[in-house]
Image: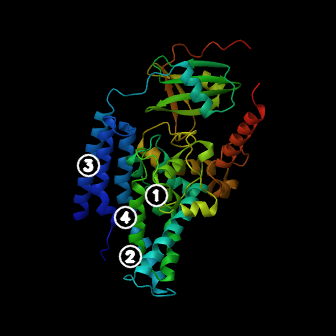
Amino acid sequence: MGALIQFAVSAVAVALMVGLAAWATRGRGAPPLDEATARHWLDDEFPGRPVDGLWLASDGKGAVAKSGDDALVLSRMGVGYAARKVAWAKAAGAGLEDGRVCIPLADIAAPKAVLAMSAWPPKEPAA
Amino acid sequence: MKTLDPVTLATPFFIATVILEIVLARFGKLKATYETSDTAVSLTMGLVSSIAGLLTAGLSFAAAMWIYQHRLFTIPMTAIWAWIAVFLLEDLTYYWFHRLSHERRFWWASHVNHHSSQHYNLSTALRQTWTGGVAGTWVLWLPLSFLGFPPAMVAIQKGISLVYQYWIHTEAIRRLPAPFEAVFNTPSHHRVHHARNPRYLDRNYAGILIVWDRMFGTFQPELDEEACRYGLVHNLGTFNILRVAFHEWIGIGQDIVRQPRHTLGWLFGPPGWSPDGSRDTSASLKARWAARQAAGAGRGPA
């Protein structure tokens, strides 16, 4: 019984702390991703990989870069980003989910990137 | 048998200090970054881990009691020298447990969730594993009972170590006085441990005493010129708590099903190991980083 009460009190405390975090961070979300920031993230996540083309999500919550035969995908995760590499053909052929492009990432820890791309697949840069 | 549990005793302190850190950070009085979903995951992981731990606590304590019955010596729980000895030996055990938890995938699968936040604050300390008991690392502490330390004494010291490690999960404290930094694990040393920068990967495994890292060659000081970037080499793309808790276990399962003849490698290779070397391990990331550094240094000014 004592353990149950302790668990219940802890659960209430967790709810309180999460609520406090929500209040403290209100209006302090990450700014929309711009090209310079996206390139900086890509350089951090995929050092040395050339970027042949870069497309930003219209809501600034992600980006897709073409690097050779690969797509380098950035997807907003809180105030940071999750980054994954998939085959370009797979990314270019991605379907839609609620009007946004849904790129399967084949990773249990990051199953998909759902990005608001204005036109997809993009017109690839000239070779 | 009822034993003193330092973690339970410290829980009100954990709650009060998380609240304090959030509020002071909100008003710009100290450095800390919180995010609602991230905080919810960290704290819920901590809450549920207290239940998950109970599932195997009986087994591990029974094993310790059985070993203790076959002990080499009888070490009195009332002697100061015994507490000093258990402090040192438990901390040494923790160092190797923690190193194993980073360098072999089977144990990393249990520990990875503690590192999965892209933030570093006091709530991150509470992002504890649900599968530590299943991973069986409690076996590493059994030799202490075999030596003759009463299992309750070992359990108390483990709790003290866990409580000590709570307060070092913060960006609010930059550096402590040099003599303290030289001997003890500190927020600065542990920030390095949580960083995903290649230079910082697989460093500073200490629990309380950083001297073990200095002795075994895994020490890395925090450098002013290289700010820590927190999280995993491949950060999570979801706040789904079940994926946070179990993703690496599921990943191991998927890999074994795909290539069963490499089962041992998938289980006990370093995290990121693959038969064809197509994935990133800490060692390969560090090597590429070092090569880039060397190339950059060799280029020199025009």
Q: Colour scheme used in the picture?
A: rainbow
- Where's the C terminus of chain A, which quadrant? top right
Specify the amino acid type for callout 3.
Ala
Residues at circles 1 and 2 in contact by the CB criterion of under 8 Å: no
At which x and y percent is residue B155?
40, 71
Give the residue drawn at x 60%, y 33%.
Answer: A44
Residue lying at 57% horizontally and 47% vertically, measured from the top left: B251
**Mark 1 to mark 4 CA distance (whole Å):** 11 Å
Task: Find disc 1 in the rendering and name its residue.
Answer: B131
**Frontmost residue, B54 versus B115:** B115
**Label 4 belongs to which residue?**
B54
Q: Are marks 4 and 3 in contact (CB under 8 Å)?
A: no
Quadrant hosting residue A79: top left
Residue B170, visible in the rendered structure: yes
Q: Are marks 3 and 2 on the same chain?
A: no
Location of residue B28 by image quarter: top left
Residue at mark 3: A13
Q: Nearer the viewer, mark 4 or mark 2?
A: 2
Q: Mark 1: give few (<14), some (14-19) or many (20+) Cα within 10 Å.
A: many
Q: Nearer the viewer, residue B236 or B249?
A: B236
The kind of residue on which mark 2 rests is: Ala
Q: Output the chain of dot 1.
A: B
Q: Which residue position is annotated with label 2?
A: B152
Tag 4: Cα neighbours inside 10 Å, few (<14), some, or many (≥20)?
few
- In the rendered image, residue B302, in percent from the top left (x then y), is placed at 77, 24
The N terminus of chain A sits in image quarter: bottom left
Q: Between B157 and A11, which is closer to the camera in this rendering? A: B157
The amino acid type, in three-letter code, at marker 4 is Leu
> Which is nearer the N-term, disc 1 or disc 2?
1
Q: Position of residue A118 (x, y in %)?
A: 51, 13
